[in-house]
Structures are given as structure tokens and as C-alpha cells.
Amino acid sequence: MEKSYYIKDDLKKFGDISEFQEKLGKKFFDYYGEVFEEGALSKREKALIALAVAHTVQCPYCIDAYTTDSLENGASEEQMMEAVHVSAAIRGGSSLVHGVQMMNKVKDVSM
């Protein structure tokens, strides 16, 4: 069986990204950690947002991480799937709204 480009165990190596650039890696992880602290949004809400974004950018590592994070922060399966549908709606809408650019170009070329 052919090995997949996505290697599930690589998610555990995320902290290793500082290896080649320690200063910037530390700054990133300090920022990253602060972003996910409880604030105006709860940790559950942030995990659900991250889960939706993970699907939007189609990052399998992020999908794994934020599925777990969502569950650990009390999100239900229904809430997680709703977040995925929000992602799908935004991706679909983004494609469709760019149809206006095509329509403008057709009108411009046709005139």
C-alpha cells in the first residue's frame, strides 16, 4: 500500500517547527497559546471556529487537532458538524461571489 503524503503522526511534531528558527517559533507559539486562552470567546467557541477554519483551509492536521479540542472543550457532534457546514457555505459563497467578476468581464467584452 502506498504511503500517504499526510502522515498522522506528524501532528505530534508540530512543536518541532522551532528547531530551525527558535526565536520565531517561540514567538509563534506564545501568540498561538494566547489566542486560544479564554477571552471574549470561550475555549469551546474558539475550538469550533478553528475546526471550521481547518475545514476551509483543508488542513488534515488541524482537522484532527480541533476535532479533539472541540470535544475536550464540550462541543457536541451536532455543533461540530454545524461548524463544518458554515465552512462549506463560506467556501461555496466565496466561489459564487467571484462569479460577479466573470459576469462583469463578459459584459465588458460583449460591449
Image (cartoon, helix red, strand yellow):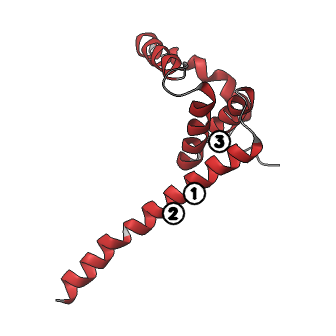
Q: Residues within 10 Å of mark 3 (few under 14, many from 20)?
A: some
The one nearer the camera, 57 or 93, is: 93
Examine the rendered structure and indicate whether residue 32 appears above or below residue 101: above
Q: Secondary structure at mark 2?
A: helix
Q: Which mark is drawn over residue 88?
A: 1
Residue 28 in percent (x, y) is at 45, 19
Asked whether the beta carbons under mark 2 and mark 1 sit within 8 Å of each other, the answer is yes
What separation in Å lies between label 2 and label 1 (alpha carbons)?
6 Å
Q: Amino acid at mark 2?
A: Gly
Disc nearest the viewer among 3 and 1: 1
Q: Split into 4 quadrants, where in the image is the C terminus?
A: bottom left
What separation in Å lies between label 3 and label 1 (alpha carbons)?
16 Å
Q: Secondary structure at mark 1?
A: helix
Residue 83 in percent (x, y) is at 62, 47
Query: Going 23% across and 84% down the picture, which residue do you hit?
Result: 107
Residue ID for mark 2: 92
Q: Which mark is drawn over residue 60?
A: 3
Residue 1 in percent (x, y) is at 83, 49
Query: Going 61% across and 40% down the picture, which residue do you hit?
Result: 51
Q: Secondary structure at mark 3?
A: helix
Examine the rendered structure and indicate whether residue 97 appears above or below residue 3: below
Q: Which residue reaches farthest front?
A: 40
Examine the rendered structure and indicate whether residue 104 appears above or below residue 47: below
What separation in Å lies between label 2 and label 3 (alpha carbons)?
20 Å
